[in-house]
């Protein structure tokens, strides 16, 4: 076996070991902020409301995780939301919501071991409807996210975005022992939510 044969055979054997593993983080940068319809602190229809006025709310959330054992690491996440709502019927509220998020993501799957800041912007609109006889609420929402913006243009796992439809039901039940033991599970809230992307797209999970 001559010298050139040894070089060729060695390169074939070594190349798979040095080859970068192909993987995908599709959808991983979207933490999901379509929760406002399910949160009872949002504006929900009530028989006691002033139905002629607009209502608005705003929230600010931040979170930081530090897990050095993961190959995909989310560091700081900051989310700001604003919501404007008004009655569109006697028992139904319509709303418009805008939220913007900034997050840090790091990956240790590729050779580059890169990181990036990501900006996520989303506009959503939906409704919340009060059912009669204390049967709870039904709600629906459609969101229009902007394609995530990465500060590191070389980040290997970029994702896209598609609109999402959401529908669900929520009800808050008062436990029979609430008057005697108000501090022990006095209320029980049940919620069911279904969501679906409006179309299939290769870089969206």
Image (cartoon, grey):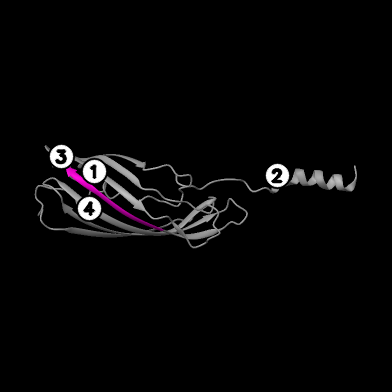
Q: Which callout, 4 or 1, points at the residue further toward the start of the chain? A: 4
Relative horizontal placement of residue 17, taking residue 69 as reference (left or right): right
Vertical side of 102 occupied by 186: above or below? above
Q: Which callout, 4 or 2, points at the residue further toward the start of the chain? A: 2
Q: Which callout, 1 or 2, points at the residue further toward the start of the chain? A: 2
Q: Which residues are magenta?
A: 120-130
* Mark 3 nearby-residue class (10 Å; few <14, some 14–19, many ≥20): some
Judge by depth and name the residue closer to the eye, 187 or 89. Answer: 89
Do the residues bearing badges 4 and 1 touch, measured as CB atoms within 8 Å? Answer: no
Vertical side of 171 occupied by 157: above or below? below
Spatial separation of the CA atoms under disc 1 and disc 2 = 52 Å
Residue assigned mark 2 = 16
Residue assigned mark 1 = 139
Spatial separation of the CA atoms under disc 2 and disc 3 = 61 Å
State the image coordinates of residue 192 (x, y, percent, origin top left). 28, 38
Spatial separation of the CA atoms under disc 1 and disc 3 = 10 Å
Q: Which callout, 1 or 3, points at the residue further toward the start of the chain? A: 3
Relative horizontal placement of residue 93, taking residue 79 as reference (left or right): left
Residue assigned mark 4 = 95
State the image coordinates of residue 191 (x, y, percent, origin top left). 27, 40
Q: Which callout, 2 or 3, points at the residue further toward the start of the chain? A: 2
Q: Quarter holding the N terminus?
A: top right
Q: Which residue appears at 18% of the width and 58% of the height? A: 55
């Amino acid at each position: 076996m001559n010298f050139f044969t040894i070089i060729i055979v060695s390169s074939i054997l070594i190349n798979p070991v040095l080859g970068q593993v192909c993987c995908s983080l599709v959808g991983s940068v979207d933490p999901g902020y379509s929760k406002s319809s399910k949160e009872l602190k949002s504006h929900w229809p009530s028989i006691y409301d002033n139905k002629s006025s607009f209502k608005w709310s705003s929230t600010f959330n931040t979170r930081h995780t530090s897990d050095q054992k993961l190959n995909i690491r989310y560091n700081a996440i900051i989310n700001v939301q604003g919501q404007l709502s008004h009655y569109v019927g006697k028992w139904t509220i319509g709303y418009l919501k805008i939220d913007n998020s900034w997050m840090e993501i790091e990956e240790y799957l590729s050779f580059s071991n890169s990181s990036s800041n990501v900006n996520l912007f989303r506009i959503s609109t939906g409704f919340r409807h009060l059912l009669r006889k204390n049967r709870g609420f039904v709600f629906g929402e459609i969101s229009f996210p902007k394609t995530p913006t990465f500060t590191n243009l070389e980040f290997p796992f970029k994702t896209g975005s598609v609109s999402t439809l959401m529908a669900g039901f929520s009800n808050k039940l008062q436990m029979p022992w609430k008057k005697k033991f108000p501090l022990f599970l006095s209320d029980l809230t049940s919620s069911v939510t279904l969501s679906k992307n409006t179309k299939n797209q290769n870089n969206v999970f």
